[in-house]
Image (cartoon, rainbow, N blue to C red):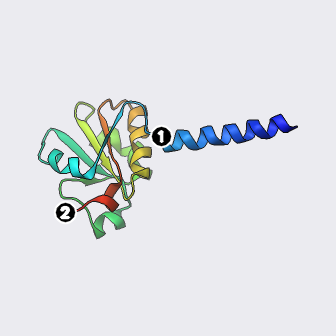
Amino acid sequence: MEYVSYIVIALFLVFILQRALPTKGVKQLSTTDLKEELINNNKQFIDVRTSGEFKGNHIRGFKNIPLHQLSQKADKELSKEKEVIVICQSGMRSQKASKVLKKLGFTKVTNVKGGMSTWVS
């Protein structure tokens, strides 16, 4: 019976780590480094926050595709040939979005660490 408790705790920890760790093959970018990337016209900039959050404050050049719509819109609105840089408010939703994009076959995906909460214009 004691072993069952250890197994449950171990599985829980694995679950938490999988959600917290960066996705394999996804680059991580700070908001400071993002400023240098914004001038690159060969990249796609996606904000996965809700439309209300995006309207309240966003970075020029970013396109709003809320996380819950990303699976349906990615193939229609994004090119798999270009790098996709993803941002949200804190970095958690953009990390999830990065996983979604990788599963959809996007090979060049970058997550902005810290999201809009660390952005200083």
Q: Secondary structure at mark 2?
A: loop
Q: Which residue is rendered at x = 27% and y = 43% of the image?
A: 85
Q: Amino acid at mark 1?
A: Leu
What is the quadrant of residue 59 in the picture? bottom left
Q: Amino acid at mark 2?
A: Ser
Locate the C terminus by quadrant.
bottom left
Q: Which residue is rendered at x = 50% and y = 44% of the image?
A: 20
Residue 47 seen by the camera: yes
Q: Secondary structure at mark 1?
A: loop
Residue 107 spot, x, y in % from top left: 32, 29
Vertical placement of 55 versus 65: above or below? below
Residue 52 spot, x, y in % from top left: 35, 67
Residue 46 spot, x, y in % from top left: 28, 49
Residue 113 spot, x, y in % from top left: 35, 49
Locate the N terminus by quadrant.
top right
Residue 78 seen by the camera: no
Q: Which residue is rendered at x = 24% and y = 47% of the image?
A: 45
Q: Residue furthest right?
A: 1
Residue denoted by label 2: 121
Q: CA distance from mark 1 to mark 2?
A: 27 Å
Vertical placement of 50 versus 24: above or below? below
Circles 1 and 2, Cβ within 8 Å, touching? The answer is no
Which label number is shown at residue 88?
none
Q: Residues within 10 Å of mark 2 (few under 14, many from 20)?
A: few
- Total numbered labels: 2
Residue denoted by label 1: 21
Q: In terms of sequence position, does the residue under pointer 1 or pointer 2 come before the other? A: 1
What is the quadrant of residue 78 in the picture? top left
Q: Residues within 10 Å of mark 1 (few under 14, many from 20)?
A: few
Q: Which residue is rendered at x = 39% and y = 33% of the image?
A: 102
